[in-house]
Image (cartoon, rainbow, N blue to C red):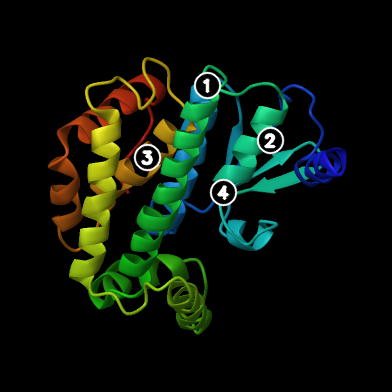
Amino acid sequence: MASLVGEVMHLNIGPTEKWPSDVAFFQPYQVEQVTLPDYSNCLAVRTFLNMSGLKFDLQLKTNAEEMSPSGRVPFLKIGAFLIAEFDTIVANVNMRGLSISAHLDETERSEMTAYITMVHTVLYNAELYLSWIDKDIFSSTTRPRYGSVHPWPLSWVLPWKRQMEVKARLNACGWINKTEENVHDEIRACLQALSDRLDTNIYFFGEKPTELDALVFGHLYNLITFQLPDSRLTDIIKKYKNLADLCTRIEGKYYRDIKEN
């Protein structure tokens, strides 16, 4: 059974040769199109690849979401394979023997997985809620950005269709009836747990970054810098100084070209 599972994974995410030189990274346009939750995911994957020392060619496409095999961004083209979303991309890199968390023991790896699940569950759902359910953010930011590359009436129809999809997802996971303050409380609880784990360390598991550091940076840096109607999210995050310092540290080491949205 184990070998069968391995074969299925092998087929789904591609062969395990070392990193090719022509990997392409696809995402929507950063400044005028991409939404808050989508750019958090894009930034998390880019950071992970940068931490891994893996080169890629950034491709900005207005139809990146439609091109993606999962319908979500970002996605990579590695040889003949299209691989979408953070966890699957990390798994692909790990299968090539290029893991940045190979130094962790079994207990630490399990702990890292639990924190990654928490970030996916809390921060990503919070970003979906704020972007698509909060009326002010939806009207002023999400709808114009999501519809910007389409002519009327698609510029109105497609954001509405996507909003219905997000509502269905949030309803399924119990988030649709939360208030904005409930969502902020969820964010605070998540940040407190992350802050406690980071403590005074350079990275979450010592002196070397892992995929958790990349994922947290993607979400928090984006929440701090993304242009929203007010600064409440930025103010919440900056109360956790060690997390804000982590973002500054990662930006300084792995980026020279990030520009605010």
Residue at 74%, 21% (x, y): give it.
Answer: 18
Direction from residue 170 to residue 202 in the image, left or right:
left
Looking at marks 3 and 2 on the same chain, the residue that comes earlier in the sequence is marked by 2
Q: Is residue 225 visible?
A: no
State yes or no: discs 4 and 3 in contact (Cβ < 8 Å).
no
Q: For residue 21, what is the image quadrant?
A: top right
Amino acid type assigned to the residue bearing label 1 in the image: Asp
- What is the distance, in whole Å, between disc 1 and disc 2 at their CAs? 20 Å
Q: Position of residue 72 (x, y in %)?
A: 58, 58
Q: Is residue 202 left or right of residue 237?
A: right
Q: Quadrant of residue 231?
A: bottom left
Pointer 2: what residue? Answer: 92
Q: Nearer the viewer, mark 4 or mark 3?
A: 3
Which type of secondary structure does the marked residue at label 1 adopt?
Answer: loop
Identified by mark 2, the residue type is Asn
Circle 3 is placed at which residue position? Answer: 216
Question: In x, y percent, where is residue 104?
Answer: 51, 21
Quarter holding residue 258: top left
Measured as percent of width and height from the top left, residue 100 is found at 54, 22
Q: What residue is drawn where x is 47% and y is 73%?
A: 166
Mark 3 or 1 closer to N-term?
Answer: 1
Q: Relative to the observer, which residue lies in front, 70 or 243? A: 243
* First in residue order: circle 4 vs circle 3: 4
Of the image marks 4 and 1, the number of the one nearer the N terminus: 4
